[in-house]
Amino acid sequence: MADAGRPTFLRANRLEQETLTIVVGLAMAATLAFMSPAFLDANNLVSLQTAIAPALIVGIGMMTLFMIGRFDLSVGSVMGMSGIVVAMALDAGAPVPLAFAAGLLTGIAVGAFNGLMVAYFGISHLITTLGVLYMLRGIIEVVMVGEKLGGFTGFPPEFTRLAQWTMGGVSGFFVFALLLCAAFEIFLRLTVPGRRLLFLGGNPQAARAIGLNTARIQFFAFVLSGGLAAFAGIMMTARAGMANRYMGEGLEMQIFIACLIGGGSIAGGKGSYIGALVGVVFITLMTNAFNLLGVPSEWQAVGIGTFLIGVIMVDAIIARGKSGSS
């Protein structure tokens, strides 16, 4: 009885929701393996890795924002824009490192703009990032006028190898994304700046009272989100060997859902990078299930939209319960 009041390991490490999502995800994977033999096919497993890697990298940035009570709806457009920038630079004859830097700086610049508007001008993160989403999609359409549906192709081998190398059938890009997620989880749990993210999201007034520069933290969180989205876009361009107007389209909603079901909250103050991984894997499995079971694309959109509404409702109820109890 002496341990009755002691929190469990999962509660102490804020992993209860993540664990629940893992259990449901494993059940989904087992069901898929039973219902569709193609699920365990080597090509499908490679496809899953290819889908998880960029989404996880973007999810790391989104989860960082969730922790401080913010989110970024422009990440899909940043992916697409950065991929096109690096492709245009390569097409113009720029060396691979310079083209890579150009694409990365594009995302960082967009993230800095978002951070400036939200952190220093006090504009809603919803309005800012939604506006940037449409602005970048418009720029992409203007840039791609006259280009074929396939967009830019014919990249040098030293660029495509960045995301196409494998180790024993496992994508190197996928392994890198996992290592990056692990590094951010260590940062969150074992460093003072990492712990400050959750503290700021959970109690902004107290964070300001003890002298935390909340505006600067928000600014750099948006810069991180933009930079990671750009990196994911560049790597996806290298992986696919092409850059077109469709890259990243609609990805922001999938990442948003993934972070919510992975333990994040739009109210801030909770979340983990393990949760970002778990959520991304869950959403990827759900999309893969739709495809393997032959669900029409329009009904896939209905399913994902319904799931999003349900997750937001649950998150809102939990957030209201927390504010009521406090």
Image: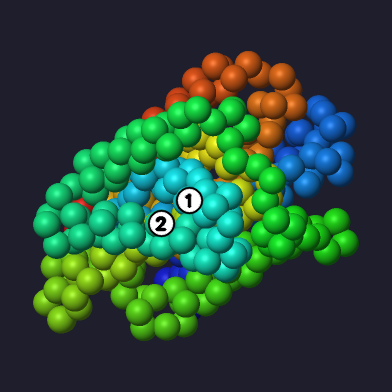
Q: Residue at x 19, y 68 (%)?
A: 215
Q: Residue at x 44, y 74 (%)?
A: 188
Q: Quadrant of residue 27?
A: top right
Q: How many marks?
A: 2
Dot 2 alpha-carbon crowd within 10 angstroms: few under 14, some 14 to 19, many 20 or more: many
Q: Give the image location of residue 89, x and y in percent.
A: 52, 54
Using residue 255 as the reference point, say whether residue 177 is left or right of it. right
Confirm whether residue 50 shows in the render: yes
Image quadrant for the C terminus?
A: bottom left
Callout 1 amino acid: Val
Label disc, if present, on residue 211 of the rendered structure: none
Taking 220 as reference, is 191 left or right? right
Closer to the camera in the image, 93 or 35: 93
Question: x and y percent of residue 278 in the render?
Answer: 58, 53
Above/below status of 26 relative to 219: above
Residue 96 rendering spot, x and y as whole percentages: 60, 64
Which residue is at a point 42% across and 32% down the rendered structure image? 141
What residue does disc 1 label?
85
The CA distance from mark 1 to mark 2 is: 10 Å
First reached walking from the N terminus: tag 1 or tag 2: 1
Q: Report the front residue among 138 and 27.
A: 138
Disc 2 target residue: 107
- Determine contact: label 1, label 2, CB under 8 Å: no
Tell me if 72 is positioned left or right of 18 in this view: left
Helix, strand or loop under label 2: helix
SS label for mark 1: helix
Identified by mark 2, the residue type is Gly
Foreground: disc 1 or disc 2 = 1
For this orientation, the residue located farthest to the front is 93
Snapshot quadrant of residue 271? bottom left
Q: What residue is shown at x 83% (from left), y 64% (from top)? A: 167
